[in-house]
Amino acid sequence: MKDCLYTKLNKEAIMQTLLKSAKFSAILITIFLIVPGIVASADDAITVTSFGGAYTKSQMEAHHKPFTKKTGITVNSADYSGGIAQIRAQVESGNVTWDVVDVETQDVTAACDEGLLETIDLSKVPPGADGTPADEDFIPNALHECGVGNIVWSNIFAYDETRFPDKKPATVQDFFDVKKFPGMRGLLKRPNGVIEYAIMADGVPPKDVYTVLSTKEGIDRAFAKLDSIKDSIIFIETYAQGPQMLADGEAVMIMSANGRIFNAIVKEGKPFVIVWDHQIYNMDYYVIPKGTKNLENAMKFVMFATGSQALADQTKYISYGPVRKSSVALIKTYEGTDVKMAPHMPTAPANFKNALANSPEWWADNHDEMIKRYNAWMTK
């Protein structure tokens, strides 16, 4: 009996000591107090899939980590190269492993039409930081029945200025002029943006691009322009590979997303130059594949990551514009620098003079045909 009492008292003393220790208190705080009022299961986790590189890093810092801090829900990151083929394969097989996917405008339209995505209750999208209702706060077309917009970004071309000590490339025509500006060009291994660039380089103004490309003659004309530089092309699998190809000297010019090049210039000190002439601007959306087993948590993430502050915070890490008007006043400087980000956005007036708006309708109608023809062109 005495031994039992001694043991009991000893255990109580040990517990009191533990409770007083900073380490044990820290453990209790981590488990119970990190997010007051919210308790998340250790099994709570979602997978958010995006395009890798600097872009995914910007989402991890501005969206993933703050979301986990607020909710306790872990966010696992996966990369892909775009399109809807992998989403379709997961949904059709009934084995959906991606909970949220970052897709481009044409892909949200196509995937939604095919029934590959969960519908979004847009009435639940929170108002802006200034109280503006969501349907007034988001720029046109950023709210979709199957997705919520997050960024405005642009296909541009960029070059290494050390490779052109005299005259510099300045127009979309220069990208296709291998005599005046010799060297290899990096192009994406998918037609989106490439076809439009080719037809504009052949003299078609932005306002007429999709009208011309809606004819067989227009498509033939675009591919003929691509043929003119076929011997000077290296194909790029993902946007993340482009800046490295430029840095390694594999190419002297590349088509890329503006944010990738900005990061290489500002963060890595690369001697790259962005050419905004005839930029093709687009939007990305967060979507949820049909049949995810984590629908509730996926929806929570989408609503959080498209809030005013989260979208503004992303501009600390990459030069893509937020799609909420209330986010603009919250844009500050690039991480660890005094570089003001507003002038580096695709929609900054100096960058937007002859921009082309990507047409999701045209791509939804022509995507499969363009993929087939572009793949054939790459391999011939």
Image (cartoon, rainbow, N blue to C red):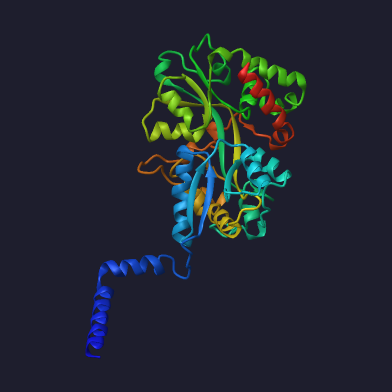
Is residue 51 found left or right of 140 in the rendered image? left
Locate the C terminus and report the quarter of the image it occupies: top right
Judged left or right of residue 294, residue 164 is: left
Q: Residue furthest top?
A: 179
Task: Tell me if 1 is positioned left or right of 214 in this view.
Answer: left
Q: Position of residue 19 (x, y in %)?
A: 28, 75
Seen in the picture, residue 18 relative to 207 is either above or below; the reply is below
Q: Is residue 12 above or below residue 274?
A: below
Q: Is residue 315 visible?
A: no
Q: Residue furthest bottom?
A: 1
Residue that appears at 43% across and 45% down: 316
The picture quadrant where one finds residue 122 is bottom right
Residue 102 in view, yes or no: yes
With respect to residue 227, does 239 lie above or below?
below
Question: In which quadrant of the rendered image does the N terminus lie?
Answer: bottom left
Residue 113: percent from left, percent from top: 73, 44
Q: Residue at x 67, y 57 (%)?
A: 121
Give x and y (percent) for residue 69.
44, 59
The percent coordinates of residue 195 (x first, y second) are 65, 24
Residue name at image x 65 percent, y 49 percent: 94
Q: Residue at x 65, y 26 (%)?
A: 196
How many marks do you count on the picture? 0
